[in-house]
Structures are given as C-alpha cells and as structure tokens.
Amino acid sequence: MPVMTIREAVSQALWEEMERDPNVIILGEEVGMWGGTYAVTKGFYDHFGAERVRDTPIAEGVIVGAAVGAAMNGLKPVAEIMTINFAFLAMDQIVNHAAKIHSMFGGQFEVPVVIRTTSGGGKQLGATHSQTPDVIFAHFPGLKVVAPATPADAKGLLKSAIRGRDPVLFIEHSTMYQERGEVPADKDFLLPIGKSDVKRPGNDVTIVTYSKMVQITMRAVKQLEAEGIDCEVIDLRSLRPLDLGPVYASFKKTNRAVIVEEGWRSYGVGAEVAARIYEECFDYLDAPIQRVAQKEVPLPYSADLEKSAIPGPADVIAAVKAVV
Amino acid sequence: MDQAEHLTLYQQMVVIRRLEEKSAELYQQGKIGGFLHLYIGQEATGVGAVAARSPHDNVITAYRDHGIAVACGMEPKVILAEMLGKVTGCCKGKGGSMHLADKRLNFWGGHAIVGAHIPLATGLALANKFRGEDSVTLCFFGDGATNIGYFHEGLNLAAVWDLPIVFICENNQYGMGTSIERASAVPEMRQKAEAYGMPSARVDGMELLAVHEAAAAAIAHARAGQGPYFLEALTYRYRGHSMGDPERYRKQEEVRRWQSDDPIGKFEAVLLKRGISPDDLNAIEAQAEATIADAVRFAEESPFPPPEELWRDVYAEPEAEPQPA
C-alpha cells in the first residue's frame, strides 16, 4: 500500500473527486494561484483552471455563503477556511444556513457542501490563531463534523464527505500535515462518516480521543504498556454523528475511561462522552472518568508556555494512572 | 406587457393585500405563531420585479417573504398552511412565515437572518454561470440589510466574479424602527453599489410598471453577461415591522401620506385609464377574496405534522437521521 502524508492524502482525495465529478469546485483564500496556504491544492489551479479552483477575497462569510448557495443549486463545493479560528466569521453561514436549510425548508433543498479547515495549537500563533473549538460546531444538528487522525482516514472520509448529500465541516490538524501512513490507492476508497475506530485493543482502560490527540495518546499508551497497563484506544473520527457504540462495548470490558481532547475541558468532547458513558454504562463504572484537555486559558505565544497548556503524553499517562 | 398580463399583476397585488390582511387576523387569533412581517404597501416592488423574470431565473429574499412568494407563483393556500404550521405547508410546517420556499418555482426562500441570503444568492448565481446557463438571480432585501457585512462581502464577490445577479433593495425606509437617516451613512442605498463599480438605478417602488421596466432592464443586463446590477425601489410598509411593533418611531400622518400613494390604487387608476372596466377590476377583487377564503379553509382543515416528522429531514442522507430519543 502506498505511504503518504496527510497533506498528500487530502490532496489526492480532492484531486480524484474533481476528476470524477465535474461539479466539484474548490473555493477559498489562496486555494488557486498560491496553491493553498498549507499547500494542499498545489497544482490544482493549473490543472483544473480558474473556474473550478476559485480564489476568493478574504471574506469568510461570503466564502461559505457562496458555497452553500452553489451547493443548493447543484454544485459540490469544497470551501476552504484557512483556519477554524476564521470560521467564526462564517459561523452564521455554517450553523444557521448550511446546517439548517435542508430541514427548515422541509427537505426541498440539499446542501452538499464540504468546508475544509484546520484546527489546533502548537505553532506559536497566539491566542486568536491557535484554538481547537471543534466541539462548538458539533453542537448543531444538521451539520457533520469530521476530524481525521491518519492519512488513510483523511482520504476516505474526505471522499465520503464530497460524495455525500449533507454539509460537512472537515477539520484537519494544522500540525499534522507531514504525518505519514499507508493509504489505499483505490479511487473509490470511502470510509463511512460516523464510525469510530478502535486503534488499539486493550483490557485495562478505555481511552477515547480524536484528531492529533490520537497520536499523543498512542505515545502515552506505549509507555503505559511497558508498565503493564493495557489501554484500548478509540478514535471518534467524527464528532457529529458521534458513534459511541464501540466506546460502550469497550467500557463494559475495562470499566474505566479517559477522554483526551486538545480543546478546553469545559463543555467539551470529554464532558459529552463521559456523560453518555455514565448514562449508558453506570453499572460498569469502577472509577470516575478522567478528562484530559487544554488548560483553560487563551493560548499564549511564548513556546514553552503554549506547550504547557496543550495536552501531551504525560497528561494522558497521569489520567490513566488515576483510573487504574 | 399586454392587457391580460397587466390584469394578472393587478390580481397578484390584490391577492397579496388580502392574504396579508387575513394573516394579521389569524395572527391576532393566535393561529399563526412566531413573527409575522406583512408586505402591505410594498406589493408593487415584488410583483413588478418578479414579473420581469423568466421561469428559470432564481428569486431569493429575506423574511418579509409572503408577497414575493405569491409573485413567484406560490399558492396562498400553501403559504397559509405553512404559517399555521400545517404539514401541507410549503415546508411541511417546519419553516413558518419567514421561511417560505418552493424549489419547483425557483423560489429559494425566505431567509430570516438579515443579509445572510445575499451570499447565498452569489452561490446560486455562480452555479448557473458555471454550467453555462443564462439564469439570473433576483436577490431582494431591505434597506436595513445594506448596513451589514454580508451585503458588502456579497456585492463585492458578485462584482469580482461578474455574477448574473440583480440586487433589489426594497427601501421601505426603516430597518425595524430605525430610519435610514439614523442607520445609513448615505441616503440612497444604491450609492453603496457604486463602491463595487456596480451599475444601479433608483425607481419609485409604488409604481408597478416603473418597477417592472427597471427590473426588466436590470435582468437583461445581468443575462447579457455584464455582471450584477443594483436596483433600489423606494417603497413603504403600511404596517409595523412585525406584528409586535408599537410604531413609536413614525407619525401616523407619514403613514397616511404613503397610503395615499398606494401601489394598488395607483395601478388601478392606470388600468381604468387604459380602458379596463371597473367591473373587471371588481371581478378580480371578488376572485381574490374567494381565493383567500379557500386558502384559509384549506389551511385550517389541514393536519399538523405527525410527531415522527420531528426526526425527519435533519439530514438528506436517511442513514444520518437522528434516532428518536
């Protein structure tokens, strides 16, 4: 199987879907001549042309709004919002329009739009450019929120998002584009949206996570293994739909859970998943569920300070040791 | 336009007026919930402009949408059923007064966040242009929407991409209760289009034929591939912003002055001058009354959506639908 980076996997998925369906267009800031600020669409403008790879003004509201309108009217737009921090400028289009138009008009319109964006801190970009507010978007029924952790998942889930009939916020992690992994070469490699993935089976603790924290968790799990603690790791892959079946199955085996996310703890993924485990698996509970999350401060610029606020393997290890 | 077309437009305006009066009544009876924004006084802008479109041209508007819906060909019974929250409404009772739409009529809604449908209009137009179709998108909004960011992002993109859009500002002179003098840096909304190099016109929105003529020219401009056009129609709403408006911001004599300039009365005078008999107009009036009476009956007798409808159409893909819980 070919090995490639997440950048290459996302790029390949986009390229193949544009080759496959002439209604797929890309629009966003610097997606064309520049080749994408994360170089995901490098070469697209020359190959597919300015009609299908559309550079836009720096105006997030109309980028998403135009994509939603074009999706209603038969195109399959992939809008790129440079970072999720700028998605707040398009918040109304994402949550009041993309997420609601199908339902609110009684099902007459479909909005098959994909909004690609990047999330996550760790690049010394300061408080407004470093957030991981993924969960905010997952609050809204009608929207799908996908956040892959591997190159294969990035390709398979993005292709499903583009071919699908519903609006999808597709969140890539800004520091993971160079991560490598095996990716099926199949042009029809599709992964269903809304299926968690058991990354590692284990018997002692269930760790639920997604996106970059999968990688952080796997590092922690390796160290814990050396100490004789056997963790099961589940990658949610999408925050809406949220597939907790594998989580409940795992918890009924381990009776202990840790939830790891990069965003802030309050009202977060950990809060949601823990509540659901308490509701569904109360009789299986052997220890209070632990949450690993970002320190509740706006992320600072200074490198060591920033690093200290974002969860790392040591935080995961401490949480696991608290439940076993 | 020939005489038959004139009578059709007259009939549409009368139907809208009667529909709105009836809506107000049903609202006061508690049968219509939420917000209700009446179109009374503005009939000539929607009817005149939409009459100039071809059936394959798109129409999209804001929340004051009942009149535009009628002009697009939506039946009053489907509109009233939607307002009463009935399953026979155009959105199966999920949208309400502010969210009327019918895809088959190329009427893309009824959108209730001020200005937010202006970006949607750019997307609608982009899709048509991308496919090489000659459809034009008519995007209606009020003067209030010209002060919001979406308006400027949308007009700029439409101009940069040469999109076939006619932006139609129904300037009724108040954004809710705040007059344009108190909310807008410039007195004429079309001045804002000049910032985007967009050609524009300002027309008397109480004169049906003037609106129609101006809209036809604007649509022709956009259809010919010359990019977007901005049409401002000066009009007035006789009722409050919504049903809950105390109207402390304007004087009754101002309302009365505009009522003496009534678009229906003025067009009636034009028709009589052109030889239409009062009997013909009375017949249209009677027919409109009957249409609305039938529509009320239909809406009242229609069932509410069944409980399971709550879980439908959240997503287009059936497997994604949430499960009842």
Image: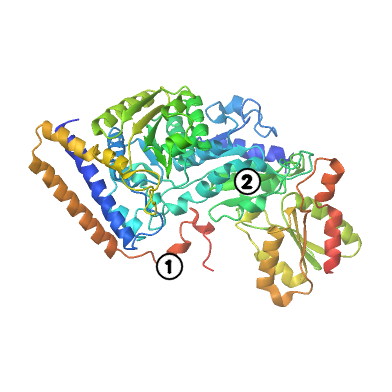
Q: Amino acid at mark 2?
A: Phe
Question: Is residue A306 in sight in this rendering?
Answer: yes
Circle nearer the viewer, 1 or 2: 1
The foreground one among A300 and B265 is B265
Q: Secondary structure at mark 2?
A: strand
The foreground one among B144 and B50 is B144
Marking on residue B307: 1
Circle 2 packing at 10 Å, graded few (<14), some (14-19), many (20+), is many
Circle 1 packing at 10 Å, graded few (<14), some (14-19), many (20+), is few
Where does residue B128 sit, x and y in percent of width and height?
A: 42, 33
Q: Secondary structure at mark 1?
A: helix
Q: Quadrant of the C terminus of chain B?
A: bottom right
The foreground one among A119 and B131 is A119
Who's the residue at 47% across and 43% down the image? B114
Marking on residue A170: 2
Give the quarter of the image for residue A277: bottom right
Who's the residue at 23% across and 39% down the image? B260
Look at the picture and state if B308 lies above or below A152.
below
Q: Are labels 1 and 2 assigned to the same chain?
A: no
Q: Quadrant of the N terminus of chain B?
A: top left
Report the chain holding disc 1: B
Where does residue A232 sit, x and y in percent of width and height?
A: 78, 63
The answer to whether the residue labelled 1 contacts the one labelled 2, judged by CB atoms less than 8 Å apart, is no
Question: Is residue A20 in sight in this rendering?
Answer: no
Q: Amino acid at mark 1?
A: Pro
Report the chain holding disc 2: A
Image colouring: rainbow
Give left or right: position of A305 versus A13: right
